[in-house]
Amino acid sequence: DTAVSQTPKYLVTQMGNDKSIKCEQNLGHDTMYWYKQDSKKFLKIMFSYNNKELIINETVPNRFSPKSPDKAHLNLHINSLELGDSAVYFCASSQANSYYGYTFGSGTRLTVV
Amino acid sequence: AQSVTQLGSHVSVSEGALVLLRCNYSSSVPPYLFWYVQYPNQGLQLLLKYTSAATLVKGINGFEAEFKKSETSFHLTKPSAHMSDAAEYFCAVSGPNTGNQFYFGTGTSLTVIP
């Protein structure tokens, strides 16, 4: 069983569209995250979320919104997609104590045309 | 705020040569330190971690790293590079003093020359 799974793996869409990326973890972790990896491989935290608190990186445009139907899922909704949103998006999860590290999904490559 | 510096965004080594990837952190309190590897078109995979036990940490695929508090460093090494080691490597710091948030370095791309 995949510990952290993301769908879809590839997403090609036109500017202005709205899209969602789904993430599910079966590890029983308390916290989930979304990261954006740009073309230079730099990892940028977008959101972290547990059942108590959503922490938003203030540099993330409000076109991006996380939605968590339950503890095991954290989906990413993106409205009015722009060319600059093209990147690889990673979901990750961890226990409350970062001692154990993060477990990452395999990523979603988003291409906006 | 915590920060992690990876010296050298690109490192090339010959197959069979020593691999040395550098990582320095800024923290007044010894943190948790991690190395992750990202193979092409894949997610990040944990290589090894330091969490205040032994300062020399052994990970998967023959990699190891040594925590040196006096130098605030956590460099990653492997005695003999293999072609399959070609990947992107990320150092990260976390811990109770960061609110358990991870701070990643900017990554080092390792190329192995046959």
Image (cartoon, coloured by chain):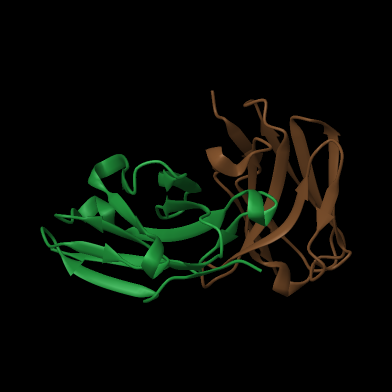
Q: Is residue A99 above or below residue A41?
A: above
Residue B87 in the image: x percent, y percent?
Answer: 35, 58
The image quadrant that residue B27 belongs to is bottom right
User: Which residue lies most toward the top here?
Assistant: A1
Q: Nearer the viewer, residue B69 or B3?
A: B69
Residue at 72% over, 73% down: A83
Quadrant where the N terminus of chain B sits is bottom right
Is residue A11 visible in the rendered image? The answer is no
Q: Where is residue B68 drawn, in percent x and y? A: 35, 60
Q: In the shown orientation, is residue B55 left or right of residue A35?
A: left
Quarter of the picture holding the C terminus of chain B? bottom left
Side of A34 relative to B14 (left or right): right
State the brown chain. Answer: A
As drawn, A38 above or below A46: below
| On screen, residue A79 above or below A51 | below
Q: Say which residue appears at 87% left-offset and 63% top-offset.
A: A63
Counting the numbered discs, the total is 0
The colour chain B appears in is green
* Residue drawn at 45 percent across, 66 percent down: B107
Determine the image quadrant of residue B8: bottom left
Q: Position of residue A60 (x, y in %)?
A: 80, 67
Q: Is residue A72 left or right of residue A27?
A: right
A106 or B61: nearer the viewer? B61
Q: Quick check: can you spot residue B48?
A: yes
Q: Which of the pair A96/A70 is nearer the observer?
A: A96
A70 in relation to B101, above or below: above
Q: Viewer-proximal residue, A110 or B45?
A: B45
Instruction: State the image coordinates of residue B34 (x, y, percent, origin top left).
Output: 46, 51
Q: Residue at x 34, y 43 (%)?
A: B54
